[in-house]
Image (cartoon, rainbow, N blue to C red):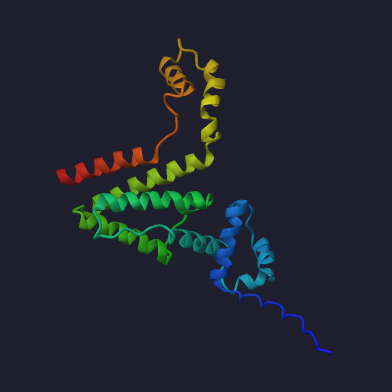
């Protein structure tokens, strides 16, 4: 009679800094950053919490590493590409990445962010702008203006209380609170949305183009 052998159990991947960080990112994406703790992360990895400290120094180091991985997902601009096209691609890439990781925007703007991916991303951005003729000072103002638009628009998109397809119905339900005799312009805009002549949704590209146009004008004047 032939003997049967049960399959060997699949070995767990060894614990590493990258595995810790990637698992933490997945948990934060699924449950939010507030729900992420060292104990929960250890449970997810099937290890004791103290084992994590062989790979991350503390919770701050964990968050710094997570943010740097997210920054590494954003398209890095090239000085060989037209600067407007490069900044537009960088901005739309960053917006998409931050929507994929809803917790990351607030962490990114509230941390020092000196990880290698972030430093490479910022350095490439400055290099692209410098190659386009911006001074160091103007290049710094430029990328910060673009990033303020990215972060603000992303946070608004993530926290907007209505779905896009609900907006016309929501406008109709609120129009009574906006009497035309007190708020004529806002009332008129609301009726535009209700009638389907305008969707009422803000456009990421619209604000980005205004910033790029302004920066180009400032560069040319300088």
**Residue most toward the front?**
1
Along the viewing direction, whichever of 112 and 160 lies nearer the viewer: 160
Q: Relative to residue 64, is residue 32 depicted above or below?
A: above
Residue 207 placement, left or right of 51: left
**Residue most toward the bottom?**
1
Task: Residue at 45%, 50% (x, y): give it.
Answer: 96
Give how far across and how far down residue 212 sits, in percent. Answer: 27, 44
Along the viewing direction, whichever of 91 and 181 lies nearer the viewer: 91
Question: Within the image, what quadrant is residue 22 found in?
Answer: bottom right
Task: Residue at 65%, 75% (x, y): give it.
Answer: 12
**Residue most toward the left?**
221
Residue 1 placement, left or right of 205: right
Give how far across and how far down residue 44 sits, in percent. Answer: 67, 64
Task: Residue at 81%, 89% (x, y): give it.
Answer: 2
Along the viewing direction, whichever of 31 and 108 lies nearer the viewer: 31
Give how far across and how far down residue 187 sits, in percent. Answer: 45, 17
Along the viewing direction, whichever of 156 and 62 lies nearer the viewer: 156
Question: Within the image, what quadrant is residue 211 found in?
Answer: top left
- Residue 56 appears in the picture as rendered: no
**Residue most toward the top?**
181
Q: Relative to residue 174, is residue 31 depicted above or below?
A: below
Give how far across and how far down residue 18 sits, in percent. Answer: 53, 70
Quarter of the picture containing the N terminus is: bottom right
Residue 185 placement, left or right of 133: right
Q: Relative to residue 172, is residue 6 depicted above or below?
A: below
């Amino acid at each position: 009679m032939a003997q049967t052998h049960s399959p060997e159990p699949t070995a767990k991947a060894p614990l590493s800094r990258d595995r810790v960080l990637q698992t933490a990112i997945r948990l934060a994406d699924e449950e939010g950053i507030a729900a992420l703790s060292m104990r929960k992360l250890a449970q997810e990895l099937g290890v004791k919490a103290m084992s994590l400290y062989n790979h991350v120094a503390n919770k701050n180091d964990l968050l710094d590493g997570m943010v740097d991985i997210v920054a590494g997902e954003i398209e890095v601009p090239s000085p060989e590409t037209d600067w407007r096209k490069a900044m537009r691609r960088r901005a739309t890439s960053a917006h998409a990445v931050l929507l994929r990781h809803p917790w990351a925007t607030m962490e990114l703007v509230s941390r020092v962010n000196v990880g290698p991916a972030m430093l490479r991303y910022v350095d490439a951005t400055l290099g692209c702008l410098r190659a386009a003729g911006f001074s160091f000072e103007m290049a710094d103002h430029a990328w910060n203006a673009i990033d303020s638009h990215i972060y603000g628009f992303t946070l608004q998109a993530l926290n907007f209380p209505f779905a896009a397809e609900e907006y016309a119905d929501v406008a109709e339900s609120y129009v009574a609170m906006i009497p035309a005799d007190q708020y004529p312009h806002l009332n008129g805009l609301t009726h535009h949305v209700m009638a389907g002549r305008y969707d009422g949704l803000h456009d990421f590209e619209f604000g980005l183009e205004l910033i790029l146009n302004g920066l180009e004008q400032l560069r040319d004047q300088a």
